[in-house]
Image: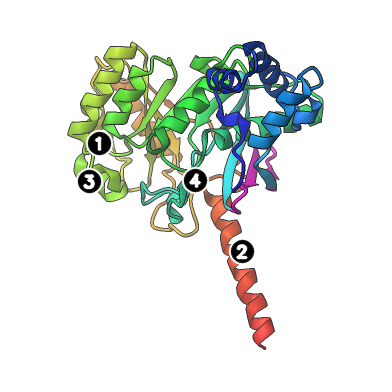
């Protein structure tokens, strides 16, 4: 059985684990510092931690569980990583460069069961959740990439918008967040982190109750149940009349602005009438911002196309005139496999094709 990643432990969990095994709490501070400040990748490099503690850690945990399988670099500085897990599964992580800092988009599941009909991530169904350590290690792998470039750059922002539904892996997600915001380690500010969900009402409420002050984005993508159910099958279980009260609960208990994500699909959900209906659904009184997202076409999903710039501008203007705060997401990595899950899907298909060709050659 593979040993788990030590990145999966919050500081309090690590301290309690060491105390139970006869070590003093300051050992946890030493180990934490080596992991997240000095960023070592081998327990043996923790030179001021005593041998007994090093042996204990080595017997029960590993530091690295991800290996770089593919790396794509865009002209705009975006870097997309395809990591291989210890069980052979592949996940995607993306580094994006902004004027305000360096942002990493992380994955929370191997595949996705939400089944949004426009999304590359859903082409391959979920096989398992990622552990908290596997999610944290994505950040660490990107930080090691930056360290090797010797540019003294640090990951400053995180978006949990990669493959999978984060709230379908809730406990590991929360542990991951507690690790990366810890002031003794990476110290990434809570307000520099955004978690994106397709809309699971009870988990939205539970997330508000954590009091973590992390930003939340909810993918709506349609202003009514009929259209939303057609493009997002999750709407069958959690229709808009269940989703909006959960959003209101979040707003009431956190007093934080929520982001409404809306991918614009040509001829599907991008008309002026759709914009007016969305404005009515959200209402001027809710503390919300609509983030309009240009669609990244997926080869296997050719029924969907990107809305043209005229439609995007008209949709934006209509929302603004109705008093709705809105913005258009800046694009990154458009010259590489931009859509989430696209690189992973392509690599899996290429591997399968290669295997079939090798089998044919042997049989021939």
Residue position for label 2? 350
Foreground pick, 24 / 241: 24
Using the image, determine if residue 350 lies above or below residue 339.
Answer: below
Indicate which label's residue lies in the foreground, 1 or 3.
3
Category of crowding for the residue at label 4, using alpha-carbon neighbours closer than 10 angstroms: few (below 14), some (14–19), many (at least 20): many
Residue position for label 1? 223
What's drawn in magenta, residue-wise? 69-88
Residue position for label 4? 296
Q: Estimate the spatial distance between the alpha carbons at disc 2 and disc 3, rounded to whole Å.
A: 34 Å
Kindly tell me whether residue 286 is visible in this rendering.
yes
Give the image quarter of residue 283. top left
At a point 44% along the width and 46% down the height, the residue shown is: 306
Of mark 4 and mark 3, the one earlier in the sequence is: 3
Q: Are marks 1 and 2 in contact (CB under 8 Å)?
A: no
Q: Is residue 182 left or right of residue 67?
A: left
Residue 343 percent across, percent down from the top left: 58, 51
Of mark 1 and mark 2, the one earlier in the sequence is: 1
Using the image, determine if residue 184 lies above or below residue 350.
Answer: above
Question: Mark 2: which secondary structure?
Answer: helix
Query: In what quadrant of the picture does the C terminus appear?
Result: bottom right
Foreground pick, 263 / 15: 15
């Amino acid at each position: 059985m593979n040993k788990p990643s030590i990145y999966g432990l919050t500081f309090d969990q690590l301290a309690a684990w060491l105390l139970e095994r006869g070590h003093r709490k300051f050992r946890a501070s030493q180990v934490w510092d080596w992991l997240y400040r000095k960023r070592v990748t081998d327990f043996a490099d923790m030179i001021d931690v005593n041998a007994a503690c090093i042996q204990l850690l080595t017997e029960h945990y590993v530091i690295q569980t991800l290996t770089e399988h593919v790396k794509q670099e865009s002209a705009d500085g975006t870097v997309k990583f395809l990591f291989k897990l210890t069980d052979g599964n592949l996940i995607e992580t993306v580094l994006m460069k902004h004027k305000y800092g360096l942002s990493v988009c992380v994955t929370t599941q191997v595949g996705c069961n939400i089944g949004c009909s426009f999304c590359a991530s859903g082409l391959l169904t979920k096989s398992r959740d990622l552990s908290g350590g596997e999610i944290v290690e994505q950040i660490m792998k990107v930080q090691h990439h930056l360290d090797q470039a010797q540019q003294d750059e640090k990951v400053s922002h995180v978006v949990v918008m990669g493959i999978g539904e984060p709230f379908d892996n809730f406990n590991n997600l929360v542990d991951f967040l507690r690790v990366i915001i810890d002031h003794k380690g990476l110290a990434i500010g809570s307000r520099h982190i955004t978690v994106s969900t397709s809309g699971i009402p009870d988990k939205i409420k539970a997330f508000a109750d954590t009091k973590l002050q992390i930003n939340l984005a909810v993918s709506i993508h349609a202003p009514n149940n009929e259209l939303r159910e057609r493009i997002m099958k999750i709407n069958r279980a959690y229709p808009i009349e269940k989703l909006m009260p959960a959003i209101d609960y979040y707003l009431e208990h956190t007093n934080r602005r929520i982001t409404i994500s809306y991918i614009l699909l040509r001829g599907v959900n991008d008309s002026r009438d759709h914009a007016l209906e969305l404005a009515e659904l959200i209402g001027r009184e809710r503390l919300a911002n609509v983030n309009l997202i240009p669609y990244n076409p997926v080869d296997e999903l050719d029924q969907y196309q990107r809305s043209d710039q005229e439609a995007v501008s008209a949709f934006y203007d209509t929302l603004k005139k109705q008093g709705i705060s809105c913005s258009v997401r800046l694009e990154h990595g458009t010259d590489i496999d931009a859509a989430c899950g696209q690189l992973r899907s392509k690599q899996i298909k290429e591997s399968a094709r290669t295997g079939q060709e090798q089998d044919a050659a042997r049989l021939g």
